[in-house]
Amino acid sequence: MGRKNGSGEGSIYKRGEKWRGQIMIDGNRFSFSSSDKREVINWMSEVRVKYNNRTLVTKDNMTVKELSERWLKRRLEPTVSETTYYKTERLIRGHLYPVLGEYKVQDLTREIIEDAYPRMFEAKQAKKYKRCNYCASTVKLFSSKFKAILKYAVELKILPCNPHDGVVLPKNESAEPVQAYTASEQRKIIDYLTKNPTGANRVFYLLIATGMRTGEALSLTWDDVDLSSGSIKISKTAVNYKGSMLIQDHPKTKQSVRTIYLSANTVKYLRNLKNDDMNFRNLVLANNEGNIYHTSALRSKWIKTCSKLNIPYKGLHALRHSWATRALEKGIDIKTVSVMLGHSSVVTTMNIYQNVHSDLQKKAAEMMNEVV
């Protein structure tokens, strides 16, 4: 009968084209594979050094941060796009690590997790002009990732069961009314942008004239625009990746892939833009260097534009909301508005524009006075 390896002992063997090393430390098995045998030998040496220096991470002393880093690299990174990985990593680092990062995984309980959520998502002063309150969708997305991380701990036999099961998320505050400009403010904005069709103003005009998301507008090339039919094909988006803007070959959701139709005024506006000098990336809304506008630069320019027009700053997304609000007020049915916005369902549209929808229902009820 073969002898079991003692603590600190290990073995190296070849499986297929790769070398594999295994080592037992205090009942914990560690393994590593590489096509380079020397790399495996060096790894085993490092494990022993860390064990002797009491810095080796084992199942008994693994922290939430260490578990999360392992999950990100071994479970998430191989299965998602680079931008999705980056966004998830930022979400976890920004909310989980400051509150629970140094907790031992084995010490986590449902009560500890529930008590941590309000602290992980407390309101923060993001900028001088805006206080940041995290929306329900952000908390829900984070909770799904945190639950997956702890499920990974169960798979690794660090935990007997998932302590996130049954966790009650903090009750969301009442949703704030959607931030949209009034009809008179919108008319003022469009008049100004039409008379000054240069620079970032072109971006602002397309957002308020079509209801597109900012990333969708910034990623548009002239290949996506059909001026003869007055339509735009939306199939990608521009994203901020580690401080740089790049075009992702798919939009926010599957439903975001769509064709939207333009008003005659918007077609005329775009036709005039196309007559300008073309840029090397064929972008519809390129910056002065012929490249993608950075969202932070657009935000700064929109703040200045609002100040110039003497209207309140409500964020770039308010331009999209303004288009949708006017469309609903004009009597366009909510299903059509939902499709043009690229929402996943009509329910999403109704939840976002519930105040607008309620006002329209009240007007409908008043109109029925003549009948009932």
Image (cartoon, rainbow, N blue to C red):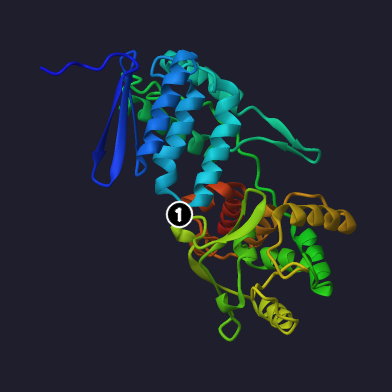
Label 1 environment density (alpha carbons within 10 Å; few <14, some 14–19, many ≥20): few
Residue at the location (51% across, 55% down)?
A: 252
Name above or below for residue 290 compared with residue 70: below
Name above or below for residue 40 compared with residue 302: above
Q: Is residue 62 visible?
A: no
In the picture, measured across the screen, residue 37 lies left or right of residue 290, that is left
Depth check: give the residue in front, 25 or 45. Answer: 45
Depth check: give the residue in front, 78 or 274. Answer: 78
Name above or below for residue 215 compared with residue 49: below
Tell me the quarter of the picture where residue 281 sits. Answer: bottom right
Residue at the farthest left position: 1
Q: Position of residue 155 (x, y in %)?
A: 31, 28
Q: Where is residue 142 in the image (x, y as percent from the top left)?
A: 50, 35
Q: Is residue 220 visible?
A: yes
Residue at the location (54% across, 39% down)?
A: 89
Q: Is disc 1 placed on a helix, strand or loop?
A: loop
Tell me the quarter of the picture where residue 101 sits. Answer: top right
Name above or below for residue 247 compared with residue 176: below
Q: Position of residue 66 (x, y in %)?
A: 48, 26
Q: Position of residue 40 (x, y in %)?
A: 37, 34
Q: Mark 1: which amino acid?
A: Ser
Depth check: give the residue in front, 323 or 205. Answer: 205
Residue at the location (65% across, 44% down)?
A: 177
In the picture, measured across the screen, residue 41 lies left or right of residue 271, that is left
Looking at the figure, which quarter contains the N terminus?
top left
- Count the labels in the image: 1
Residue beneath disc 1: 345
Residue at the farthest front position: 38
In the picture, measured across the screen, residue 345 lies left or right of residue 230, that is left
